Image (cartoon, coloured by chain):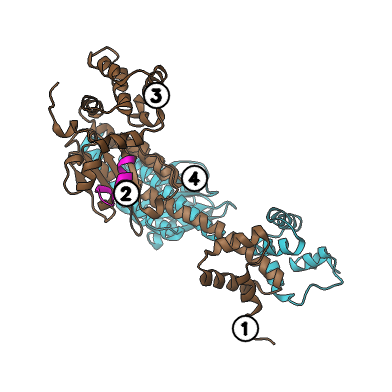
Amino acid sequence: MTNQNGSVLRSSPSARSLIEQATIAPPRAIANWFPVSERNKVRSAIGTLTSSQARSTDLGRLTLGSSPEKIISDVQVSATVVLRLNERECRLLWRLTAPSEQADVGAAFGALPAVALRLATSRSVDEVLAATVDGVRTCVPSVVFADVYLRDRHAADRRQFGDTPAQHLNQLQRGLREGPAVDALAGREIWSTDLPNDLRWPRLATVIPTFLRAGMAIPLHGAHGPMAALVLVSGRAHAFDATVQRAARLFALHAGLALDRAITEEALRRAVDIRSAVGTATGVLAERYRIDADVAYAALRRASQDSNVKIIELAEEIVNTRQIPRLIDDLIRNRPTTSG
Amino acid sequence: MSSPSSPQRQEIARLFAGLAAQLQAEHHEQPTLDRIVELALQAIDAADHCAITVRNSDNQVTTPAATDPLAAKVAALEDELDEGPCLDTVWEFDIVTVTDMEHENRWPIWAPAASRLGIRSMLGVRLDITGQPVVASLNLFATRLSAFDPTDIAIAGIYARHASNALAAARYEEGLRAAARSRQIIGVAEGILMQRFGLTLDQSFELLRRYSLTYNVKLRVLADNLARSGGLSAGGPATSDTPATGLEHALGLEKDTCD
């Protein structure tokens, strides 16, 4: 066994720990590393693997003899990565994730209308993210892993839909504050022919799993600038040519439109809930102190500003406990009155 | 007809992605409608004029957007004369075409009138606005005979899909904005009822809803009355009233119940 490509075979301890972290919950999480069509096979293969508690070395040997069940044995090798990552296994995983056949560009463009329609009719941010990650591999040739990197304010407490390795790449970028997605949020498309050897992001390059090679990050534009970046990764260096870039750009336009709308609608739905709760608290105050609703609302707002507590939190406290916070009580009792 | 080659497909895909972006850039209904008619002329070469006909949930037909007064007039004529392809599109068909207005006999009153205004052919495509109780049609008019070929019809179909998505999104967002406004005042009424009668939030909503159903008055109106009365009755409710009649008074329902 000769080492034909140093960067691919490089297996730093940090890469190992990252991959181990990324796959704490097999087999589901590991299966997400594979194209959708292979996932069920992967899940069952890993199921067999973990139940038999086979040793990783045995699995490596199994795979090297090329058997008719190539896919299943490949799956076993990549499952081995979870148990023990070594250079040979890393290389095999790389082979698995590298697209073997020429990308079908025509088919990719032909698939766009259906995917664009699904994006356009998605009503929630979660639906849009799921449609984006599902659709991008059909519409953009050569993409193996995909995820959406959301701005911090949109990313909090959000369900994850991306492929595990791409999700992982995004977590690294968020932690390090560097990488293609971080740069793409400034509004530019970012392309990397080989992420582990890309010196624009030196810290990322040292910790990125070595089977993530060519990468691109395309800003998803909203009405107020980029809200997110579409992150696409291949297992092969230099995998993304001009055709792939065009397809990705086009897809990102649809995904960005859908995401922008879903974020706006989510904010509006949230506004309906907030207004409702604030209204109820206003009504409670108005009735309790026998004051005008406008006066009650002004007191609520003033209390929120003075105490630096969100108005929705004050409102919910009043509605849930039926107790009036001291600050509001004082504000209403000591308010300047025009009529005697 | 041969299927388009890969570069052509890319070109078409890029064109429509660009149009979709422009259509969805407006987040309100009227600007979206205006943009749909304006961009339709760019997307469908053969069209000279464009108007949108909308049938609302109460079956009222209107022409809320048109590229020019002529398009508005031709579309509005249909409502006046109670016949025409735009009406048929909003009621029944997905696509309607007229190749020669002068010799068109499906609409014996409207077609000659449109012809006199200089319209020789037309293409109407239905806009299906998902999740909304309205139907609309995109009406493309041409001053040439048989202006629309199968390619134009195909492009108009795809364009209509994008336009429908944009319109549905704009209407949904406007609905949410209106809901945010009315939910606040309904919230105030709920809060007043909770405090006055010691109800839970759900019970107070249910009480409002029952009054709304019984007296056939909109929830929002009842809530508005109650919120106002809270301020007016600052001295306390009239002691002779029972709680129920006091409430009916506050809800503005005393007219039919008192003598």
Chain for disc number 1? A
Q: Amino acid at mark 4?
A: Thr
Chain for disc number 2? A
* Residue B174 pos. (x, y %): 50, 58
Report which residue position mark 4 lands on. B130
Give residue A175's mark: 2
Q: What colour do you see for chain B?
A: cyan
Nearest to the eye among marks 3 and 2: give it. Answer: 2
Residue positioned 48% across, 41% down in the render: B93
Tag 2 or tag 1, which sits nearer the N-term? 2
Report which residue position mark 1 lands on. A336
Look at the numbered disc 4 and give the secondary structure of its residue.
Answer: loop
Residue situated in front as seen by the camera: A89 or A313:
A89
Which residues, given as a range, are shown in magenta? A168-181
> Position of B174 compared to A69: left or right?
right
Q: What colour do you see for chain A?
A: brown
Q: Residues within 10 Å of mark 1 (few under 14, many from 20)?
A: few
Query: Is A231 in the magenta?
Result: no
Residue positioned 76% across, 55% down in the render: B214
